[in-house]
Structures are given as structure tokens and as C-alpha cells.
Amino acid sequence: MNFPEKLSQRLEVRSQQNALRRLSQPNGLIDFASNDYLGFSRSEAIFEETHQYLVDQNMMQNGATGSRLLSGNHSLYEVTERYLAEFHQAEAALIFNSGYDANVGFFSSVPQKGDIILYDELCHASIRDGIQLSYANAYKFPHNDSDALESLLLRFKRENAATYIVTESVFSMDGDTPPLEIFAGISERHATFLVIDEAHALGVFGDNGCGLVQHLGLQSKVFARIMTFGKGLGCHGAAIIGSAELKRYLLNFARSFIYTTALPPHSVATIFISYQQLRAKHHSQQQLKSNIIHFSQTKSLHSLKGLFVYSKSAIQCAVIPGNEKVKAMAAYLQQSGFDVKAILSPTVPSGQERLRICLHSYNTAAEISALFNSFSGYL
């Protein structure tokens, strides 16, 4: 079958750069790669409780049957969104099918023509894609740089134009955190709208895994929070947390919400039950914190601190410049029994290729120590 020549050329270039993506297969290695920080995706208790909840609610339905604005707004949505809003100390929550859908829906519909978006240069692709679909004027600021952010604000802020400051509470490729309290102060002083993606903070930060914004007591200063459920919550979907008016606006104008089949009851029930596990202060949260501390201590013990991006999150990244070099090291660690993935350019900038190590509640101290032994043996 014919295939467009230009597309073949693009694939060939990617292959020559040793950056061609392929689907991974289950490998049985010790998991230092998945985003399942609390082990909720493998929890039999959550699986059984979700099933029983659906039985008790007489929700024997495999699919939603349509978009939420047509036939897909089953009762579990209303229950779960109320629970999420109360949990996150906000007026309202609106569930989307994924974090990608939530970010694209928000940024393509909320900022209007002539508005200003100021976003961190390392924001996730879903945020950047949403911004590209917007008619607003967008400018990036250096990573986590509050001074540069305020300079851009003074330079581009205009009357009769809304300004949105956009960042993440934990960055997916670095695992680091911006100075959120300073950002909130800047936003307040300049009367802007602060938007924070909490995908990698949910379940990890806060006494009940509520995220970094609430942990810092900043929820009243944030216009919108994007909570993604495919990481710490171990399931699927996302929600935008904010005011009731924002929710009303999104369900009228966010195209990724309006024009898609809703999540099936089982998916929404899993979100609901997993949040209840967070509220109960699941033992996995404390175990994850202990593993993060042990990882940091072991890193220092092996004199490898300078190789890693500073992070107190479940994401720990060792910068190994060059696609060939980082892939070779990842292959060595995998042969040693550890599922550690190489992050290549163009996913990250050239020269910033890295090993991305994800910590989980179910990793043991012995596994973490053994990982570093292999690390040191390779270097």
C-alpha cells in the first residue's frame, strides 16, 4: 500500500536520530517506570470495592452510550464531581476523559482573542497543544523563574485583556516544583488567573494526597487546577477544579468535553472509590514518602546527587546527555532487572536526555539500593 513520501522521510530522520518511538511490552522487571505511584492500579481492594459499588448502585452498564450532553451523564458523574469539589475545597469539578482532554479543552476555550497566556517553558505537551488552539497571545517564561514571569507580565499585560499564568505543581520530566507561593503572590498583585496542572502531585503531596496547591493552602488563589487520575490515583480520566461558573463555561465551550463519548460507569466509579482511599490516608502514601527519602539518602551515599535534577517528588531524573548514551544506560539497567526508561530528545531538549526513575509505594528499600548499585557499576 502506498504511503506518503514526506511521512516516510520524517520517520527515517527520527530513526537516524535514534529517537524512533515504539510501544513497550510488559517485561516483568522491577517497576521504576510507571506513574502508578501509590500502587492503586494494581489494588485488588479498590477493584473489588469498585465492583461492589456498581452492583449496589445497580449500574450494570458497560458504556456511557454517548456524550454527557446527550445520553452519557449517568448518576455516578454527579456523585463523583460533588465529592471531588468537596475534597479539593472548591465550588465545582468537571470530569474529562483524560488529562490531555482536560488541558486541550481548557486552553483552547477559556483564554480569548487578545488575552495573554504566560506559561512555563517546560509545560506538558497537552498544555502547549491547547494553547496552540487558542486565539490568545502566548509567551513562555524560563523554567520556574518568578522574576522572568513578572517581567513578562509588566511587558505584555494590557487593559481589557485577561492574563493567565500557567505552570505545573510537579513537572513530569524533572520532578521539580515551582515556587507556587511566589507565583500566587504575583498573580494576586497583577489580578491574573493562575492555572496549575497537578497531574503528578495528586496522591503524592498533602496529608491525604490532595495535591501541592492545597498542601500549601493556595486553593483560594488558583483559578483552575487540572487533576489527572492516571498517575497517583491509578485509574483514568481527569477533572478541572474551580468555580461553578468555570464549570458552566467549560461544559458549554470546551470541545474536548462536548464532542466525545463520556467515560463508562466503571471508570467513574473507580475514580470515586480511589478518592475515598486517599481520604482515608491510605498506607501507600506514607510508604511512598519513605521511599522518596530513602532514594535521596542512597543517592547521596553513592555520590550521585549532582547527576540528578533536584526533586522531592516521586519523579527522579538523572540527566545523561545524548540519545545513544542514555539509551545504552537504560538498556544496562533493564538487563540488571530494573524497568527504567530513557527519555530522549525531542521529548526533552537536546542535551537534556535523561533516565526517568519513578518511585512507588510498592518499591522496597532493597530494590532502591540495588538500583543504585547497578547505577554506580555502569558509571
Image: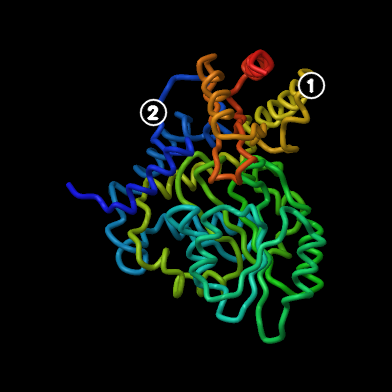
Point out residue 142 in the picture as x, y percentages from the top left corner: 72, 56
As rendered, which of 63 and 293 lies closer to the eye?
293
Q: Is residue 78 above or below residue 370?
A: below
Residue visible at 36% across and 48% down in the picture: 9
User: Where on the picture, by quarter, is residue 287?
Assistant: top right
* Quadrant in the picture for the C terminus: top right
Of residue 238 and residue 243, the one placed in the foreground of this image is 238
In this rendering, the answer to whether 253 lies above or below 301 is: below
The residue pinned by badge 2 equals 25
Label 1 Cα neighbours within 10 Å, binned few <14 / some 14-19 / many ≥20: few
In the displayed structure, does residue 248 sit left or right of residue 283?
Answer: left
Name the residue at the left extreme.
1
The residue under the point 71% across, 82% down is 158
Q: Residue at x 67, y 86 (%)?
A: 160
For the residues carrying marks 1 and 2, which lies nearer the camera in this image?
Answer: 1
User: Residue 184's spot in the image, x, y percent?
Assistant: 77, 62
Reading the chain from its start, which is encountered first: label 1 or label 2? Answer: 2
For the residues labelled 1 and 2, say whether their Cβ atoms are less than 8 Å apart.
Answer: no
Could you classify mark 2 by the number of other residues whose Cα lies within 10 Å: few (under 14), some (14-19), or many (20 or more)?
A: few
Can you see residue 87? no
The alpha-carbon separation of the residues under discs 1 and 2 comes to: 33 Å
Q: Position of residue 300 (x, y in %)?
A: 79, 23
Which residue is disc 1 drawn over? 303
* Closer to the camera in the image, 345 or 235: 345
Horizontal side of residue 79 vs 296, given as left or right:
left
Does dot 1 land on a helix, a strand or a loop? loop
Which amino acid, mark 1?
Ser
Q: In the image, what residue occupies the spot 38% across and 38% down?
A: 51
Return the x and y of residue 294 as percentages of the image width and height. Answer: 73, 23
- 289 lies above or below 153: above
Residue 17: mark: none
Pick whichever, 368 or 96, lies toward us. Answer: 368
